[in-house]
Image (cartoon, grey):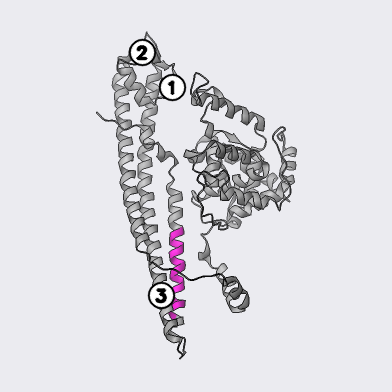
Amino acid sequence: MAYTYRDDVEFLEDCNPALIERNALEFRRLRDLLLEAKPGVQRAATHTHWISEGRKPYDKRLREARDLVTHLADGYDKAQGALMHYASALRTAKAHYSNGKADEQTLADLIAQVADAVTRTAQQAGPMRQWEDLRGTTGFLDWAAELTVDIDDIKDDANRAHDNASANYDVAKSAESRAREACTTSLDQAYKALPDYRGGGFADAKDLLSAMPALRAEVTEARADSLTRLEGSGAKAEFTKRVGKDDVSASLMDIRLKLTSLPEATDAYWAVPRNAEERREWIAANKEIIKAAAERSGLPADMVAGIAWQEVGGQWGWMDDGVDTVRGLAKDGWLPMAPEALPDRLGGNPDETSFGPIAIQVRRAAEVLGYDPAHLTESQRDTIETALQDPGQNMFIASEYLAMLKEESGFADVPAEEMTREQRKELAARYNGGPYWQNDQAQGYGRGFDTNLDEARSALK
């Protein structure tokens, strides 16, 4: 019988329906922005009274502009609809994936009653494959079994949990793959429906703008339009170049450029703040960077400062390096156990190691900076680690990560200046817990953030 395993659908862990919906809303915003321009094009055609040999080319250009706007708006409308449907299906798939993980945890608990994995192979296998190995005849050398406990004691319950997990994973896999195929087909159709239009050269556009006060006034007015960006988002940054194998992404380069005009950041690699006064001093010393990072991300400065208050008293930077080194040795096979099986805080994937005064995991920083976390080169990983350990770059990356988490929340469209204290507390919990922000640990972190928020605000003054 063919089973579906967690690693077949583990990619769902990183799929985020809320962010996909946010992208859909960006497409919807562009659709609405284009539709808003149509009446102006129509007025230009019907309210311009002009007789000249240039009238026919003028009317032709207006028709082309009107058709271009119409087709672009239609394309963005199709795209936003496709993404919205995919996000909905993804929620269903993730629900089944979560149910499958719960079934696997039940299975793991049952297995723990009768045997312990002693080899690296057994440790790295998921509970489903572990159980298949145990109930078969090939796994004796991988296990230290309790001879006083018969495996038959758990067989029925374990088989049930195993099969339930497989069934849930299979439904999750099917739901996502069907929805993804439909989504990509719709996106492809939307793209192909766009008009094949090429503009002329725009080398003189800046000169034209500077020479026409009325046109400059139009630009100023357009910037105030609510459709120029989604509510609650930061300033737009057009990073169109894919990172590929480049060591420094466009986003990281932009952060470094912004830091050149800011005061030098105060470090905490060797000596972290240990009390309220030292935290206050650290935030005060870095307040200009915190404010600049928050502005870039579309967040209130006290949100970033409050997270800094919580984080800068953590472990020393050199300890982060030590944890990363040990995990790397385990991953490369120099230690007898998998990195996830290491004891206490040493346990974990190397890409889940946190660095910097405001602790950020390598993989999360990679996402924020535009890298592909699943295909980082060693050089890219070193670049990200170095950026996280630099206090200035670290604050910008942490702020961008907070902005990404805000986009997953129910208050994604709330502007920075309108965020409530309760929303700040929730965002802090999301920072700590990620998808598990509602658990006790993350909620406790949020309460701690709220307790110290006024102190952090005071340090920014």
Q: Which residue is mark 3?
A: 64
- Secondary element under disc 2, as helix, strand or loop, is helix
Please provide percent x and percent y for residue 329.
Answer: 54, 24
**In front: 169, or 422?**
169
Q: Between marks 2 and 1, how big is the CA–CA gap?
A: 14 Å
The residue type indicated by label 1 comes to: Gln
Label ID, residue 58: none
- Where 201 sits versus 96, above or below? below
Q: Is residue 356 above or below residue 396?
A: above
The residue under label 2 is which amino acid type? Phe
Are discs 3 and 2 less than 8 Å apart at CB? no
Residue flagged by tag 3: what amino acid is it? Glu
Marks 2 and 1 in Cβ contact (< 8 Å):
no
Q: Which mark is residue 123?
A: 1
Q: Is residue 432 visible?
A: no
- Mark 3 lies on a secondary structure that is helix
Packing grade of label 2 (10 A; few <14, some 14-19, many >=20) is few
Who comes first in sequence, dot 3 or dot 1?
A: 3
Residue 106, position as x, y percentages in the image: 38, 26
Residue in view at x 57 percent, y 74 percent:
218
Task: Give the residue pinned by disc 2.
Answer: 140
Q: Which residues are magenta?
A: 26-42
Q: Nearer the viewer, residue 310 or 227?
A: 227
- For image coordinates 43% across by 78% down, the residue present is 62
When asked about the image quadrant of residue 99, the answer is top left
Quadrant, the N terminus: top left
- 128 left or right, relative to 401: left
In this rendering, the label closer to the viewer, 3 or 2? 3
Name the spot of residue 429 as percent of width and height, x first: 55, 41
